[in-house]
Image: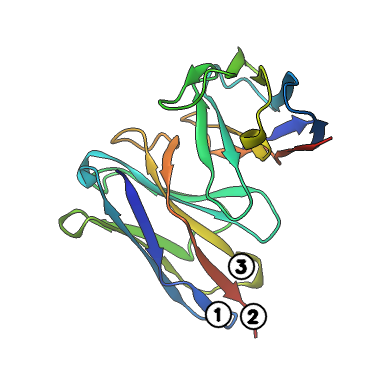
Amino acid sequence: DIQMTQSPSTLSASVGDRVTITCRASQSISSWLAWYQQKPGKAPKLLIYKASSLESGVPSRFSGSGSGTEFTLTISSLQPDDFATYYCQQYNSYSPATFGPGTKVDIK
Amino acid sequence: EVQLVESGGGLVQPGRSLRLSCAASGFTFDDYAMHWVRQAPGKGLEWVSGISWNSGSIGYADSVKGRFTISRDNAKNSLYLQMNSLRAEDTALYYCAKASSRFMTPLFQHWGQGTLVTVSS
């Protein structure tokens, strides 16, 4: 199976900060990469798919980039509603879907 | 509005069985593949199983292969997960998730709120 890693595991930031989370795959997944946001006690929410496509209804301050094995999620100006845990997930059709371990974004 | 409502979770002894259900509404159920994803308490997300729109394609994580069976009833807009030979490590919140297309591609566009399965003696 394809292994996913994320860094950092925890990120402390302030409202208005630019935040970047990195996700790496153990082998090339082209652009088959999604990002999800999860708040405590809630289900995950799809933010980004195909590495850089914004899901409908997701604020434009969220963006994704990368291909192959290295990807980033950027929040251009952190808002109070953005404090949450973020997961990357690969969905290469030739391998079971796997998630990264998550990055918790909390208040500095 | 897409709604996915899971049910059937609970406390079960190791080795026993449990059947989860997911009732779907707000979209044309038989136009989409469906999946189960689980999350152990305080841990990350793990894909469990998926099924295509017509049940023609099915997949399982290695951790549940041979023990869990996914199925769907398009006439009832429902997804199921039959879980046999349960182990302590199956303890988790089980989410039903709607895929982005008819096919098995595991991109999870919508999620239910989950049903908790606890395996313990």
Q: Nearer the viewer, residue A105 or A107?
A: A107
Q: Residue furthest bottom?
A: B121
Image position, residue A78 (x, y; %): 68, 25
On the question of residue B64 being in view, the answer is: yes
Amino acid at dot 1: Leu
Dot 3 alpha-carbon crowd within 10 angstroms: few under 14, some 14 to 19, many 20 or more: many
Image position, residue B19 (x, y; %): 40, 71
Badge 3: chain ID = B
- Mark 2 or 1: the one toward you: 1
Image position, residue B117 (x, y; %): 54, 70
The residue at which mark 3 appears reads as: B91
The residue at which mark 1 appears reads as: B11
For the residues beneath circles 2 and 1, the answer to whether they share a chain is yes
Q: Are marks 3 and 2 in contact (CB under 8 Å)?
A: yes
Q: Are marks 2 and 1 in contact (CB under 8 Å)?
A: yes
Dot 1 alpha-carbon crowd within 10 angstroms: few under 14, some 14 to 19, many 20 or more: few
Report the side of B23 relative to B30 (left or right): right
Residue pictured at 58% horizontal, 17% vertical: A63
Residue pictured at 79% horizontal, 37% vertical: A107
On the question of residue A2 being in view, the answer is: no
Report the side of B40 relative to B22 (left or right): right
